[in-house]
Image (tube, helix red, strand yellow):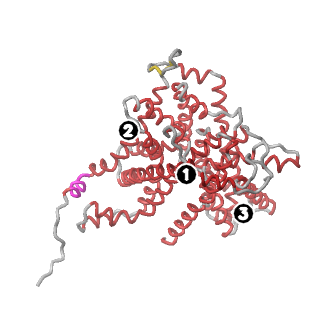
Amino acid sequence: MTITTTPARTSKPLSTLLYRHRWMRLVGLLSLPLTWLIGLYIVSLALLLVTAFWYIDSFTSKVIPGFTLENFVLIFSEPAYIATSLRTLGIALAVTVLSAIFAVPLGIFMAKLASPWMRAVLAVAITLPLWAGYLVKILAMRITFTEEGFFNSVMAPFGITGPGFSVLTVVLTLTYLWFPYMALPVYTAIRQIPVNLFDASSDLGAHGFTTIRTVVLPLLWPALIAGSVFTFSLSLGDYIVARFVGGANAQMIGSIIASNINLNPPVAAAFSVIPIAFVVFYLLATRRTGALERM
Amino acid sequence: MLRLTRGTRVAFGIVVAIVLLFMYVPLFLVMINSFNVAPIASWPITGFTLDWWVRAFQNEALWTAVGNSVVVAAGATVIALLLGTLAAFALQRYDFFGKHTVNLLIVLPIALPGVVTGVAFSNSFNNVLEPIGIQVGYFGMIVAHATFCIVMVFNNVFARLRRMNPSMQEASMDLGASLWQTFSLVTFPQFRTAFVAGGLLAFALSFDEIVVTIFTAPAGVETLPLWMFNQMARPNEATQVNVIATVLIVLSFIPVYISQRLTRAEEEER
């Protein structure tokens, strides 16, 4: 007597069809995400960018479709606009440099000097603020640097007055917000450096600092660049920080876009080209270094 | 070993101390200020009160805002989970023309400044869809949030798929399982943790989002960050914000705890 254990052959037309045709599976997987991203997002972006070539009727202040380059001429000729673009670029670069300057010693301390217990504590300590909320951190910096606030009060006996609400406070606050994005990749990269490189370096007579400069730093470039993509582009597009801790003279590109979107949409649209251009340029420049693939 | 002089070690230690003070002192100040009698943030603290806490918990607008945030984040997460997973499978399992462009397309909503994304959506909603009679309203906010949340799910699922063995699926199909059976019984269990982690990140990202929300929230609707934003814009009424900020700081221990557990579980798996 024979027992057949083969299950009844049920026909599965859809599975069979999809199994036979690779392109059908691919289309099935891609159609929804692409419809969403192109149909909603890219079309929205394109519509916004098209508005940059339209103009405002000076009597009715209504947006008139057409083609003019005046909006672009305006943002590159109006001194206040040029100053804002340069200030924004400067702030984003300052935040990136400041983050890197603190991330490297912190990473070396965590990876090479701290005990395992201390290392675990520090790893949690630098990730925790990432979750604390964007506005919470801006509020925290505002409380710290406000006129009657903590910084001025604690520093008063030393005769130091804090930066108040200024461009410097904007830089500090943006660093506060995005520092973990620099610190974590740098720390990971330092941990991955093989120990025998340090031994080799010291056998060859290099002191600690020489080792850091000639062995550690060159190996850190990919991590620093990857971190800088975050610190740079996130700072570049921000305007909430400038609004809450920047005082009167710290307008950024985002501030101009936000304040013009209802009054003069074509100018706002023309201005949004600038951060897009900066970010795309930065991403292309960093892609050439190959740093992003290695992360 | 990296050999450093005593002086250098001490200097590095001081840098670490400065970083930690810089990170945590402001957060403590927020927490302390939520109990401050003075209605305007100041130092030193003038006196202790629970008044702001009581008021915050009785504030209906605040609870409505929390509700809105949960609904928007949940909606955005569900959409992001679906679209992000589909895209991750397509890009991980197949080679096709324009693959890099698709990858860029997924990253773009988070790489471009929030103000650009927000302004682009608001332009489409108010100047294109509304004139032809389509009111996106509340749903527009969910659509905008979902768009930049896709990358969170995509990244997590994509990274996991790379480590998975595709021959398991082939074995399953050879044994007669349908495409759906293979997915639900063989494939999905293998990337479930990455799927959940991506979903949590997407939820957290949406819950915390302010810039896109400013431009896409319908009139009169506030999410929690939007409520905080509006309160902070009126400095003299900012006291209840300290209470909410304190709650959010305390709640941030939860995702850190979960991610620690997940990494530990993964290290044990290996």
**Which amino acid, by three-letter code, is at mark 3?**
Ser
Q: Judge the density around disc 3: few (<14), some (14-19), many (≥20) Cα neighbours within 10 Å.
A: some
Disc 3 or disc 1, which is closer to the eye? 1
Query: Please, is residue B19 above or below residue B136 in the view?
Result: below
**Which amino acid, by three-letter code, is at mark 1?**
Trp
Q: Judge the density around disc 2: few (<14), some (14-19), many (≥20) Cα neighbours within 10 Å.
A: few
Residue A78, image quadrant:
top right
Give the residue pinned by disc 1: B63
Work out how far the residue at label 3 is from the one at label 1, CA to CA, in angstroms: 61 Å
| Residue A20 lies in the magenta stretch | yes
Query: Could you say where residue A35 lies in the image, as x and y percent from the top left?
Result: 36, 42
Give the residue pinned by disc 3: A202
Give the residue pinned by disc 2: A39
User: Which portion, as a residue range, is magenta?
Assistant: A14-21
Q: Nearer the viewer, residue B10 or B186?
A: B186
Query: Could you say where residue B129 lies in the image, as x and y percent from the top left?
Result: 40, 32
| Residue A246 lies in the magenta stretch | no
Do the residues marked 3 and 1 share a common chain? no
Query: Please, is residue A268 above or below residue A5 in the view?
Result: above
Q: Residue at x 54, y 34 (%)?
A: A277
Residue B130, image quadrant:
top left
Query: Could you say where residue B266 lies in the image, as x and y percent from the top left?
Result: 50, 68
